[in-house]
Image: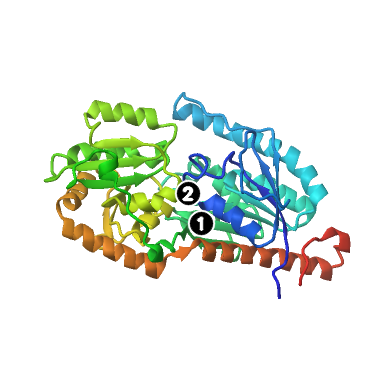
Amino acid sequence: MAESRLKILLIWPWPRLWAMGEGSGVREGWEFLHGILRRGHVLHTIAPLGSRLNVGRSDGSHSVTVAPWKEIRFGGGRLLSHFWRPFSYLFFQIAYLVRAIPIAARERPDIVVGISSLSAPVAFIVSRMLRVPGTIKLHGVFYRKRNWPRPYDFLRNFEEFIAVKLPFERIFIVEDGTQARELVRSTGAADSRVSFLLSGTSLEWLENGGRARDLREEFDLERDSVLFVALSRVVRWKRLDRLIRAAKIALTMTHHPVYFLIFGDGEEKEKLLELRASLGVERNVRLLEALKQEDVENCLRGSDVFVSVSDFTNGGVATREAMICGLPVVAANVGHTSNVVIDGETGFLVNADSRIELAQKLAILANDREMRVRMGTKAKEFAKMTFRSWTQRVDTEVREMLEVAGVAIDRSIENGEVFADETSAVSA
């Protein structure tokens, strides 16, 4: 039996598919949209002002409607940002509903899919107005379980609490090492409504064995130097300042020339440049432009150790891709990073708040080539046994969306609620 063809209304909150420009950053959004379209489904996407959602399709299977909304960021510090959040959240819902309701009424989608917690209310309202299934997809979470009073806990994470509490037919959460399961438990959401999806990875790299990029020659570095690499958005919660401060200390403990290559872009880059200058490590810490996706594998293969020190998780796609390329990982032990990085075997886990411990682990690997090779080999073996390809991940996701839409349509037909011209999913 051929797969049913679905019309999907997608509530997309970001202006781009790629977080750091076309082809740069995590592949999650690109793989999701391409996976849906490749299987013959039709997407109607609501996106913000200035959107550039280029999926390379000209067959009419993907249309984009722009909502009158654009994220506004303030440079006045955290207090102002926290004050503005609920207003921005409310404005988003209003602006998107203005566009989503007429589009949904005209196109009659079979399912409404919201992307990120910001999109949850819009997706839920539209799905209920049309009496079709609604789902939400979270790319990990920012929730961190702490011993705080519940009202304060809610205020810090209200977008995610609302997204999980709303009675969607299905909640998809990408398990990237964040505390998603703790969030679900804290809200009391029914397990039957929640699907945890493993991050997709480029497993084809295990077989292809791409050519290593000669980073030492490219950046005029010593041939015997040890290269630590980080691939990251340059935003506050990625905490690249931790790496730069630890690098300053580690450089005093190493026996070889050591360099830290940080590839990425974002609003915190200027601050990191100032920090690097104040610490006097401009030569050894390089802040470089974000890599295009096609350059990631060769860059990783040309490096020695991967480093990730984010506040929320360090077990995401970049870490997994580094392990596929045979790199040991040094990571801050937050969220469920320990499910991906096995301390002492595939790399080292360190206390996120201890720059001394981070520096010590960096120095240990810099000084011990045999350990780097041994841990890198184990990291690659772990990846081969544990990780899933993007095709496998998206197949699972789309299959579950079909099941959700199919069950809802069948029940409507049984109840005599849907007429022939009100459904567009057809079975072969």
Residue 196 point in image, percent of width and height: 52, 61
In which image quadrant can residue 91 be found? top right
Say which mark, if any, is on residue 26: 2
Closer to the camera: disc 2 or disc 1?
A: 2
Count of numbered tags: 2
Q: Quadrant of the C terminus?
A: bottom right
Kindly indicate whether the residue at mark 1 contacts the one at mark 2 (C-beta within 8 angstroms): no
Q: Residue at x 30, y 56 (%)?
A: 327
* Left or right of 345, for residue 172: right
Q: Quadrant of the N terminus?
A: bottom right
* Left or right of 164, for residue 363: left
Towards the viewer: 122 or 188: 122
Q: Earlier in the sequence, mark 2 or mark 1?
A: 2
Q: Above or below — where is 262 with respect to 330? A: above
Q: Residue at x 34, y 39 (%)?
A: 240
Towards the viewer: 122 or 387: 387
The amino acid marked with disc number 1 is Val
Q: Residue at x 77, y 48 (%)?
A: 104
Q: Residue at x 45, y 50 (%)?
A: 294
Q: Above or below — where is 26 with respect to 50? A: below
Q: Mark 1 highlights which residue?
A: 174
Residue 207 point in image, percent of width and height: 40, 66
The amino acid marked with disc number 2 is Val
Towards the viewer: 255 or 82: 255
In which image quadrant can residue 336 be found? bottom left
Residue 209 point in image, percent of width and height: 36, 62
Give the structural element (helix, strand or loop) at label 2: loop
> Which residue appears farthest toward the left when viewing the image?
255
Residue 309, visible in the rendered structure: no
Within 10 Å of the Cα at label 2, are there few (<14), some (14-19), or many (20+) other Cα atoms?
some
Residue 34 point in image, percent of width and height: 60, 55
